């Protein structure tokens, strides 16, 4: 993997001392990240999976907590905190620390560390000179920062898993180093197969990363398993910025999540969203794929769709009635789905049968509206593979939920669907 020249030279210069620097810091202690050194009151990390390494971090003053005794182990680590953590673990006596940034106040507790971290190539500023010290550090940028500090070498591509969100990884070093970090156990991928590059790295995960790098023996702690896909229940809200989901918290307040469809496109279609009964919806979504938004996997009307025992699961190609029954629906285009004449024939799913032929199930009215929402959020031009749950009545599928299969691979485009199907458009 090709790193920036400055970053590469800096890492190589200190490579033999990298692990020694961590060990020395853990044994001798360094200046704390925060000015508060008193720890009184209830420890919010007691019983937490990271308790032992948090205690060690606080004891050696690598990443300390707050004066009231809290550490906030599950809170995101900010870019400023990450800069301080890295520069304390990997001190550079030759650093001139001359970098300055539009949003970093001179003399602040993190100014010197940020200057060194950027000079050494661990982190970078925006093109406009802003460092964003209070912004959470994402898993991708943290992986790249640690990789530079540790002077990592690439592992064989054969050992890297094909995660479901590969298409969402940042281009360049951040995405590649995140895959490397997951492969080596420094960052935990989700149980359902996502790396979540935009998910903030937590303070406990950062301490774990550093502890694992500095330990010659396997650690006795491990971040817990988790699923990326989570179910949210709330009300769909439309604004000029797009669609959001308003969720009622246990305290009675509302939390509003911005929603996006596959490919970082805003969910669209006022009529389709209005078709979700009572204004409520069950939304399966993933946080950590698109910055600041939940990536929608499934949308279903709240309280509808039959009992779980009645529901069937189908996967196949999203297609409209006008083109159903074609010999190869994988070549069918999104352009056709969007044409008013074709869309008016109703949406449905073509399911591959054992004999190699496709069977078409037409969606009910609710399914048609949900499909309209999904179509507007899809970037793929052909072979739109979807998952559908619902009940089948004859050739009609009463839809409870539907989602795009973002892992589906496009088939080679031998010819356009319009030509191969031998059908004309109705509009």
Image (spheres, rainbow, N blue to C red):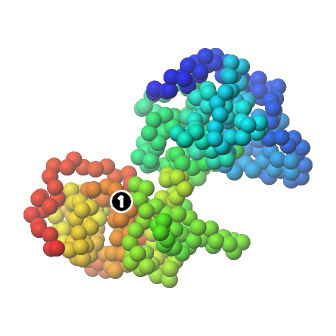
Could you say where residue 38 lies in the image, as x and y percent from the top left? 89, 43
Residue 91: x %, y % from top left: 71, 24
Picture quarter containing residue 120?
top right
Q: Which corner quadrant of the image does residue 268 belong to?
A: bottom left
Quickly name the residue at label 1: 378
In the drawing, does residue 309 fall left or right of residue 213?
A: left
Residue drawn at the location 73% of the way across and 37% of the way down? 106
Quadrant of residue 89 within the rendered picture:
top right
Left or right: residue 360 versus residue 14 is left
Q: Residue at x 38, y 51 (%)?
A: 407
- Of 153 and 158, nearer the camera is 153
Residue ranking furthest to the left: 422
Is label 1 in a helix, a strand or a loop?
A: loop
Image vertical order of residue 190 relative to residue 273, above or below: above
Quadrant of image for the C terminus: bottom left
- At a point 48% along the width and 65% down the height, the residue shown is 241
Q: Nearer the viewer, residue 176 or 56?
A: 176
Q: Is residue 30 visible?
A: yes
Work out whether 254 lies above or below 380: below
Asked if residue 208 shows in the view, the reply is: no
Q: Quadrant of the N terminus?
A: top left
Q: Residues within 10 Å of mark 1 (few under 14, many from 20)?
A: some
Task: Give how far across and how far down residue 204 sits, in percent.
Answer: 70, 44
* Residue name at image x 88 percent, y 45 percent: 39
- Say left or right for 137 vs 303: right
In the image, 104: left or right of 266?
Answer: right
């Amino acid at each position: 993997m090709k790193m920036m020249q400055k970053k590469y030279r800096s890492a190589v210069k200190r490579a033999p001392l990298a692990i020694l620097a961590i060990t020395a810091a853990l044994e001798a202690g360094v200046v704390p990240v925060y000015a508060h050194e008193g720890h009184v009151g209830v420890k919010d990390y007691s019983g937490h999976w990271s308790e032992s390494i948090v205690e060690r971090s606080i004891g050696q003053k690598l990443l300390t907590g707050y004066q009231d005794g809290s550490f906030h182990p599950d809170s995101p680590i900010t870019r400023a905190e990450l800069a301080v953590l890295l520069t304390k673990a990997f001190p550079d006596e030759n650093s001139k620390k001359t970098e300055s940034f539009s949003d970093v106040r001179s003399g602040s507790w993190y100014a010197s560390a940020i200057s060194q971290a950027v000079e050494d190539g661990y982190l970078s500023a925006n093109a406009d000179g802003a460092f964003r010290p209070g912004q959470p550090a994402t898993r991708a940028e943290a992986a790249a920062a640690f990789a530079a500090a540790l002077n990592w070498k690439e592992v064989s591509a054969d050992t890297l898993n094909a995660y479901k969100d590969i298409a969402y990884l940042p281009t360049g070093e951040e995405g590649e180093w995140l895959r490397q970090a997951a492969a080596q156990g420094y960052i935990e991928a989700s149980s359902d197969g996502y790396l979540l590059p935009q998910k903030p790295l937590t303070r406990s995960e950062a301490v774990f990363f550093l502890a694992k790098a500095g330990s010659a023996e396997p650690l006795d702690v491990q971040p817990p398993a988790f699923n990326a896909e989570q179910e949210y229940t709330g009300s769909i809200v439309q604004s000029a910025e797009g669609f959001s989901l308003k969720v009622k918290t246990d305290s009675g307040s509302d939390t509003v999540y911005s929603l996006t469809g596959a490919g970082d496109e805003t969910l669209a279609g006022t009529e389709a969203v209005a078709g979700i009964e009572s204004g409520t919806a069950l939304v399966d979504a993933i946080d950590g794929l698109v910055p600041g938004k939940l990536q929608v996997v499934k949308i279903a009307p709240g309280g509808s769709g039959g009992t779980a025992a009645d529901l069937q699961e189908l996967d196949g190609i999203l297609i409209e009635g006008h083109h159903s029954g074609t010999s190869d629906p994988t070549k069918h285009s999104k352009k056709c789905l969007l044409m008013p004449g074709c869309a008016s024939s109703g949406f449905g799913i073509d399911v591959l049968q054992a004999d190699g032929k496709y069977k078409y199930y037409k969606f009910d009215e609710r399914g048609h509206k949900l499909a309209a929402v999904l179509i507007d959020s899809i970037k793929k031009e052909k072979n739109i593979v979807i998952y559908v749950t619902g009940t089948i009545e004859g050739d009609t599928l009463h839809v409870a939920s539907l989602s795009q299969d973002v892992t589906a691979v496009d088939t080679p485009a031998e010819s356009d669907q319009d030509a191969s199907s031998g059908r004309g458009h109705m509009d």
